Image: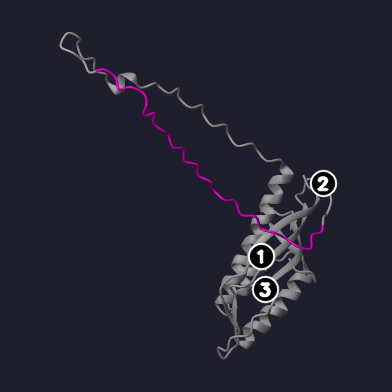
Amino acid sequence: MVTTRKRRNTWAAALGALLLTVGLAGCNNEEPNPPEPTDDEPTQTTNPAEDAIEEEPADDPEPPEELSEEDQNIEDARDVLTDYFRVAAEVANDGYETWRERLEPFWGSSPVRQAQESVMLEAQESGQYTEGAVRVVSATATEYTPDTTGGGGEMIRFDVCTDSSDVKVFDGEGNQADQPDQTRAATDVLMHRQGDEEQRWTIREFTPLAETC
């Protein structure tokens, strides 16, 4: 449960390594060989299938633990936020021609809508386009505001770290712009669930931060 907001100046991605351990069994060469059977002593044969130990059936896996309402809301809002970056990359790759119908549904306030419309119109009119996509490195919930009316108006603030190292930007004449030295960016994003029938998560605030991540 997230109840307080925490600021982080840097983010580190930790990768796990899979360690395989192989055991080697040794042989004792000093142990005498078993005596060979004689004519007076019948040879005993064994069936490996008969000697096999029956394994007990594994217990049924326990069903996954259900998320609390707050945790589920955080997961849903994070999914929408990540999807926004994916759709924005596709729009930019196509020269921003479809920005209005594809991106407007994500914008949940007038300030965000006005700011993004200005950027999109300028990019489209200049013929700008991109290749590649911004990668969301992390999106950590730092503040959760429940809706006490039951109308579905929860708000969740995220500290978002993105990486644009795979993105190439071209102007209207096809000239590639120089990539900045710092390709990671930190953004403060406030997600708001609309109180409509669809209960959509939208972006209420989208504020680039001065620090990197």
Residue denoted by label 1? 105
Percent across and percent down for residue 59 are: 51, 26
Q: How is the image coloured?
A: one colour
Percent across and percent down for residue 143 are: 80, 53
Label 2, residues with CA under 10 Å away: few <14, some 14-19, many ≥20: few
> Separation of disc 2 and disc 3 at Cα?
42 Å
Q: Which mark is residue 149?
A: 2
Sequence-first tag of 2 and 3: 2
Residue appearing at x 72%, y 62% in the figure: 160
Q: Amino acid at mark 3?
A: Thr
Residue 194 in sight: no
> Separation of disc 1 and disc 3 at Cα?
27 Å
Is 25 or 120 nearer to us in this picture? 25
Residue denoted by label 3? 183
Q: In which quadrant will I find the C terminus?
A: bottom right
Within the image, what quadrant is residue 208 found in?
bottom right
Magenta-drawn segment? 7-35
